[in-house]
Structure formats: C-alpha cells, structure tokens
C-alpha cells in the first residue's frame, strides 16, 4: 500500500522548549493537519496523560463532567490512543461538523472537533508522529501514513524565546543546562556526534 503524507503544523513555542529539554515537555498542543497537496485534512488537540491526570481532581465533584471524568480514568489505565469528541447542537448558529467519517451522537451529528489522548506523559516529535498516525488511520483511512512536522522551531530560536519568557515572567537571570539524555536524543535526531551537539547547544545560549 502506497504511503500518504500528513503535514503537521504546531502552534506554541513551549512545545519546542520541551522538545529541546529547556523545560518539561508540553502536556497538550493544537495541531493542524494537511495533505501533501496543501488541502487541510483537519485540526486536533493532542493531549497526554501528564496533562489529563492533573484535571481529575477538579472534575471529581462536577456531576455534569462525569462522562468526561470516567473517560479520562479509563484512558489513564490504558496504553493506547483514545479520542474525545466535541459536538454542536443542530440548532447552533455556528454549527460545524468534521468533513471526514467520525462517530455520530444520538442526534445524528458528527463532532466539530476531536482530541487525541496519547498514552505518553508529554509531547515530543515521536508522540506527534504516533498520535497523528493513529488519527489518520482511524479517521482519514490512511493505513500507511508518513508524518512530517512543518516549520520546526530551530534550537537557537527556541532558546532565545525561552530565555525571554523566563526573564519576563521569572524576574531573574536564567541558567540553562542541557542533560545527557537531551544530547543523546538530539545526536540521533540531527545525525551529529554528541560533542558537536553539545557545542551547538552551548553556542545557542
């Protein structure tokens, strides 16, 4: 079966801060998905266990959130991607449905938006890839999906934006240290020797 490419556009700088090891990995990220032709395939929010686990205490005593609470509990005990669907009412003035096959609710309405609940704790490029592949298979009918993350934020830009953010909201000088784990991960991703990665990281500060 021929492979099909889905191009992913991300939105936030803190996603890249986490990917580069400048802070904890992001717990959620909005993603826009495009076919290679440029046609938009959809938009999703990628969530992780680290993010949704933190929401449980707040949801515990909200009766109207019981269905969501129970779904999160089931997801946290599992090790596969789950999905959460948001539906409009048919009479809503700005009524929308996704333009691909998706579960209809009791009123025969398809969701307007879908969350991907990934079984990992935080988001990196591998999590984006596996989450989008799962979504593409389950909803877009793409069995053999190649995922490409577009407009990746270069390391130097990520470091600069992170330092500016910390200085603006932290009120003190920021000391950035790079872990051995990060250096090893970037060495594989960038196909560079570890010492060269270390020099590149330090020169970016």
Image (tube, rainbow, N blue to C red):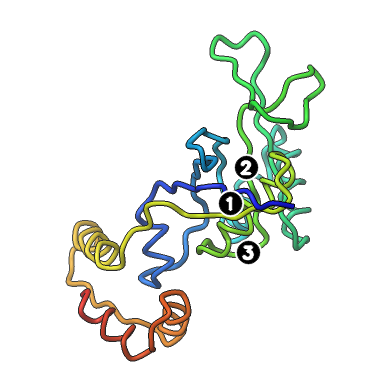
- Label for residue 104? none
Q: Nearer the viewer, residue 200 or 165?
A: 200
Q: Considering the numbered disc 3 on the image, is that residue within a helix, a strand or a loop?
A: loop
Residue pictured at 62% horizontal, 27% vertical? 112
Q: Is residue 205 above or below residue 16?
A: below
CB under 8 Å between callouts 2 and 3? no
Eyeballing the image, is 49 above or below 112? Answer: below
Q: Which residue is at the far right?
A: 106
Q: Position of residue 181 (x, y in %)?
A: 47, 84
User: Which callout, 1 or 2, points at the residue further toward the start of the chain?
Assistant: 1
Compared across the picture, whether 158 is left or right of 16 comes to left
Q: Residue at x 42, y 82 (%)?
A: 187
**Which residue is painted at 68% across and 30% down in the image?**
100
**Front in this rendered view, residue 135 or 118:** 135
Task: Determine the CA span between mark 2 and mark 3.
Answer: 14 Å
Which residue bears the numbered disc 3?
120
Question: Label 1, label 2: how many angstroms apart (C-alpha)?
Answer: 7 Å
Q: Crowding near pointer 3: few (<14 within 10 Å), some, many (20+)? A: some
Give how far across and how far down residue 150 sits, in percent. 42, 52
The total number of labels drawn is: 3
Compare marks 2 and 3 and give the one earlier in the sequence.
2
Left or right of 63: which side holds 11? left
Q: CA distance from mark 3 to mark 1?
A: 9 Å
What numbered label is drawn on residue 47? Answer: 1
Give the quarter of the image for residue 182.
Answer: bottom left
Q: Quadrant of residue 95?
A: top right
7 or 62: nearer the viewer: 7
Place residue 19 in its image quadrant.
bottom left
Residue 115: image tag: 2
């Amino acid at each position: 079966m021929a492979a099909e490419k889905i191009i992913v556009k991300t939105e936030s700088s803190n996603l890249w801060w986490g990917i580069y090891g400048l802070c904890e990995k992001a717990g959620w990220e909005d993603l826009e998905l495009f076919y290679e032709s440029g046609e938009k395939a959809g938009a999703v929010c990628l969530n992780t266990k680290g993010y949704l686990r933190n929401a449980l205490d707040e949801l515990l005593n909200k009766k109207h959130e019981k269905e969501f609470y129970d779904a999160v509990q089931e997801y946290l005990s599992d090790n596969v991607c789950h999905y959460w669907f948001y539906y409009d009412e048919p009479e809503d003035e700005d009524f929308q449905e996704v333009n691909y096959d998706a579960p209809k609710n009791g009123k025969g309405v398809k969701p307007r938006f879908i969350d991907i609940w990934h079984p990992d704790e935080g988001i990196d490029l591998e999590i984006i890839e596996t989450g989008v592949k799962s979504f593409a298979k389950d909803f877009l009918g793409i069995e053999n999906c190649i995922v490409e993350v577009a407009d990746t934020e270069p390391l130097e830009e990520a470091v600069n934006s992170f330092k500016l953010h910390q200085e603006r909201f932290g009120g003190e000088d920021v000391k950035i240290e790079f872990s051995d784990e990060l250096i090893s991960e970037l060495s594989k991703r960038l196909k560079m020797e570890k010492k060269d990665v270390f020099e590149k990281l330090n020169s970016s500060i």
